Image (cartoon, rainbow, N blue to C red):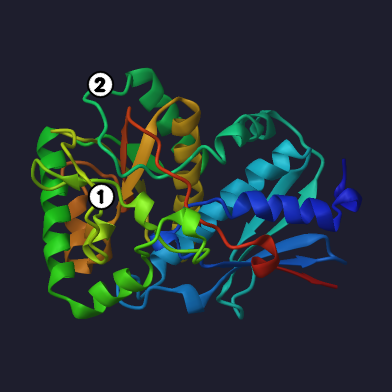
Amino acid sequence: MNALRLTPDTVAALVGDAVIAPSMHNAQPWKFVFRQNARVIELHGDPERAMTRTDPNHRALHLGCAAALCNLRVSAARHGFRARVRLLPDESAPWLLSTASFEAPNGSEDHELRALYDALRRRHTSRFPFSDEPVPDALMGGLKSAARLEGCRLTVPGDWHIETVLGLVRDAEHREDIDPLVRAESSAWTSPAPASAGTRRDGIPADAFGPRSSGGPSPVRDFGRAHPSADRGWAVFERRPQLALLSTPTDTRTDWLRAGQALERVLLQATADGLATSMTSQPLEWPELRWTVRDPLSAIGHVQMVLRLGYGPPGPATPRRPVTEVLEFRT
């Protein structure tokens, strides 16, 4: 196949797969533009969906948009194309995050991306307890390789470092509790109604909150604090969650876009391997806490996301905006 066969229907299918990506509070902060003459899909960040308090420099927005870009590449491989991506192609357009042109597939990279396609719609954030069964070294090695393919690093912290990270999560939760702007932001992007109610096409619905922790602090963000519900239930979470840190050498916008693609590639690979996943970003949202997430004994660079991996129930699907709302065709 070649770019001449990139029809509007195919573009809509590619974008429909892209928007399954995770984003902070499921805000879906992206816009896509298909330049029909150039046969290029542009990915833009949407500042109206930014978290002004918890993500003032838009790092998390870049991660979410880049996760969608990874999905676009996976979908392109599935449709018989190779997506040739340029990051930050125009300094005069700061919200234009990337462009993707399309050509015939070539090499093993396209095959590896295509193999992840079946995991796209099975990947959901799980805020439920995982078992204590360890993730095998072979699977963890595959996840590390997935991150390296995107120019990032995935490391497994030691026991003492896990305790440090969990302590930082609790510290961040306390800061959220006493900050009215953070509480208001979280409330605005969560809903007391389940996804099946169809009341909105973004944010975190009640059935994705997961249960309350009955054994002390949990390793996942408790969105239910903004909208208490009597029927959430209680559960005991794993005593020592299996965490992994995704990092980049530096902390530029390009690094954020690489990290977002690496994040989604790792999540898709984990899903394909039968693992459940969630993300813990609270301590990364506070500059005074973020630097302490990294291991001072390891040169892992800048931590972009904390992942929780294991065996447990998959999370429910969260709503997505229709493609017609996020895709524009221009000449």
Total numbered badges shown on the rendered structure: 2
Q: Nearer the viewer, residue 152 or 4?
A: 4
Give the residue type at disc 1.
Arg
CA neighbours of label 2 inside 10 A, class few (<14), some (14 to 19), many (20+): few
Residue 274 falls in which quadrant of the image?
Answer: top left
Q: Is residue 158 left or right of residue 220?
A: left
Query: Which sits earlier in the primary sequence, circle 1 or circle 2?
Result: 2
Direction right: furthest residue: 4
Q: Is residue 175 left or right of residue 331?
A: left
**Which residue carries the number 1 mark?**
232
Q: Nearer the viewer, residue 65 or 84?
A: 65
Identify the residue shown where x is 35% and y is 56%.
206
Identify the residue shown where x is 67% and y is 29%.
111
Q: Secondary structure at mark 1?
A: loop
Residue 47: horizontal and vertical position, in percent?
Answer: 50, 77
- Point out which mark residue 133 bears: 2
Q: As displayed, is residue 279 above or below residue 321?
A: above
